[in-house]
Image (cartoon, rainbow, N blue to C red):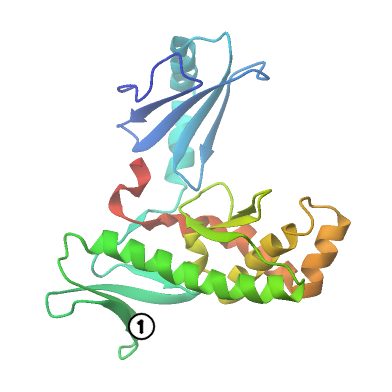
Amino acid sequence: MGQSRVSSSSRKHEVRLEDIGAQLEVRRHPGARRLTLRVSRTRRAVIVTIPVQCDLDEAGSFLSRHIDWVRERLDSLPDHVPFEHGAAMPLRGEAHSICFAGARRKDIGIDESGRRPSIVVGGDPATAPDRMQAWLFDEARRDLQASVTYHAGLLKLKPKRIAVRDQTSRWGSCSTTGVLSFSWRLVLAPPFVLDYVAAHEAAHLAEMNHGPRFWALVRRIRPDIDAARRWLQVRGPDLHRYGRSHALVA
């Protein structure tokens, strides 16, 4: 199945399925009674959960018996879209083209002169994907800072800090210390979706739960939450298609 990335004594064992282009994670779970298998749509990873007493050879055999099911699920996933010249991707809900302009331009910005707006990245094309990623982080941080400030202000609250990360398991989170963390990919979604997630996490500054009082706070500062929640459920996973070429194996 490939070379292990961590020791077999670890609680999470990662290998690479070269033949199907996916990362495999074998997770030992004390509550597991049997082997289970799932495919993560957001990370394009194959995850096998096994009981603590189960050995890795058994996990490998289990995967081999279900390899056709795994291939079928992976084949159904949308293709990865790398940051490269000519690719198309959304920004704030609107389709954009990516243009690596080379030395004739030094900065990164939006060009709206064409039939479709473009994200123009100047400088060395070899480093353009990394610089474009950093630029998108900055754009997301700017939008989220403004939205959190507005929504938290309605509740007369203030977060300790806002962090933007490349997280796949959730769109936002609030720590017990008041740090709000968000996925940079929210800047790809329409603004009303980003605003909903910002309002959601701002409300957690007052209610660290998902009870009735929490949802009442969210609806008070963001009444149109249902459309945003539906958008994230239906279209949110596709935002994980976009990223640097090595994002799938990170």
Side (left or right) of 63 relative to 247: right
In percent of width and height, residue 199 lies at 69, 67
86 or 83, nearer to the observer: 83
Q: Secondary structure at mark 1?
A: loop
Q: Mark 1 sits on what residue?
A: 117
Q: Is residue 87 above or below residue 214?
A: below
**Residue at 44% across / 27% down in the picture?**
67
Quadrant assignment, res 213? bottom right
Asked whether 223 or 156 is in front, the reply is 156
Identify which residue is drawn at 49% across, 73% down: 142
**In the image, residue 173 lies at what x, y percent?**
63, 53
- Point out the image quarter for the N terminus: top left
Amino acid at circle 1: Pro
The answer to whether residue 223 of the structure is visible from this angle is no
Give the crowd class for mark 1: few <14, some 14-19, many >=20 residues within 10 Å: some
On the picture, is 210 further left or further right than 105?
A: right
Q: Quadrant of the C terminus?
A: top left
- Does residue 85 appear in this view? yes
**Residue at the outermost left position:** 103
Residue that extends furthest to the right in the rendered view of this protein: 212
Q: Position of residue 75 (x, y in %)?
A: 42, 44
In this rendered view, identify the residue nearer to me: 19 or 92.
Answer: 92
